[in-house]
Amino acid sequence: MNIEIKELQKKDFKKVIEFAVKGMHFDRYTENKWELDIYGRYFLYLELQRASQVLAAYIEDRLVGVLMADMKGEKKKYLSIWRKVYLFLIEKALSVGYKSGTDKYDEANQEMYSRYIKHNLPDGEICFLAVDSTVQGKGIGSCLLKRLEELERGKRIFLYTDSNCTYQFYERKGFKRVEEKEIKLEIHGKEVPLVCYLYDKKL
């Protein structure tokens, strides 16, 4: 199986949204397909706006995985006024129906990061890493991480994840869990327990 790492094609943005919804298990928070699509697109645009490295894995021109990283001092490659407007509008909508849940998640990450930087000086953050669920276990995530390591060798990088995601993958790839915090999200009147993690590695 030949995995090619290249630039993410705009035609595949919808596929990345599917990866985000399935890989990050957004469907555990809501079963509404419209909400899943809106939040998946919001998540994609948010990460595209701040990413300086956007690596896409293709097998015979089929997108099978993507990695985005925000590296200090590097140019943002996917900045867009339209996406900025979309993010602004969705953030306004989220502030009405979901703010209590997203606030707790963001606050947990900020708290972990505040502790983390007391002893570390990271060069960047992995914002997003997801693989097509139909081809998981084929080394695609490993290929994407290897390419990032080749591009950013020697740099210290961190990432946020949680108990709702496949955080064990990062541990197998040499990332160290340096912070964690338990929270409870309130979404649609439901209380969702979650453990937030911060992982770190020198590439």
Image (cartoon, helix red, strand yellow):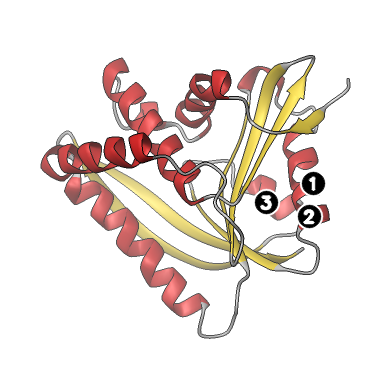
From the viewer's perspective, tell me whether residue 105 is left or right of residue 65: left
Q: Cα distance, mark 2 to mark 3?
A: 18 Å
Asked if marks 3 and 1 touch (Cβ < 8 Å), the reply is no
Q: Look at discs 2 and 3 and give the one toward the viewer.
A: 2
Which quarter shows the C terminus? bottom right
Residue shown at the point (48%, 51%) measured from the top left: 50
Q: Nearer the viewer, residue 87 or 137?
A: 87
Q: Quadrant of residue 121?
A: bottom right
The residue beneath circle 1 is: 147
Seen from this angle, which residue lies furthest left?
Answer: 96
Q: Secondary structure at mark 2?
A: helix
Direction from residue 86 to residue 23 in the image, left or right: right
Viewer-nearest residue: 35 or 24? 35
Residue 190 appearing in the image: no
User: For the residues carrying marks 3 and 1, which lies nearer the camera in this image?
Assistant: 1
Circle 3 is placed at which residue position?
170
The percent coordinates of residue 155 (x first, y second) are 73, 68
Q: Give left or right: position of 118 versus 74.
A: left
- The amino acid at mark 1 is Arg
Mark 3 crowdedness (10 Å alpha carbons): few <14, some 14-19, many ≥20: some
| Identity, as a three-letter code, of the amino acid under mark 2 | Leu
Quarter of the rendering containing residue 42: top left
Residue 151, numbered circle: 2
Q: Position of residue 145 (x, y in %)?
A: 74, 47
Percent across and percent down for residue 160 are 51, 56
Say if mark 2 contacts mark 3, CB within 8 Å. no
Q: Earlier in the sequence, mark 2 or mark 3?
A: 2
For the residues marked 1 and 2, what is the alpha-carbon distance in whole angstroms?
6 Å
Q: CA distance from mark 3 to mark 1?
A: 15 Å
**At label 3, which amino acid type do we have?**
Tyr
Q: How many marks?
A: 3
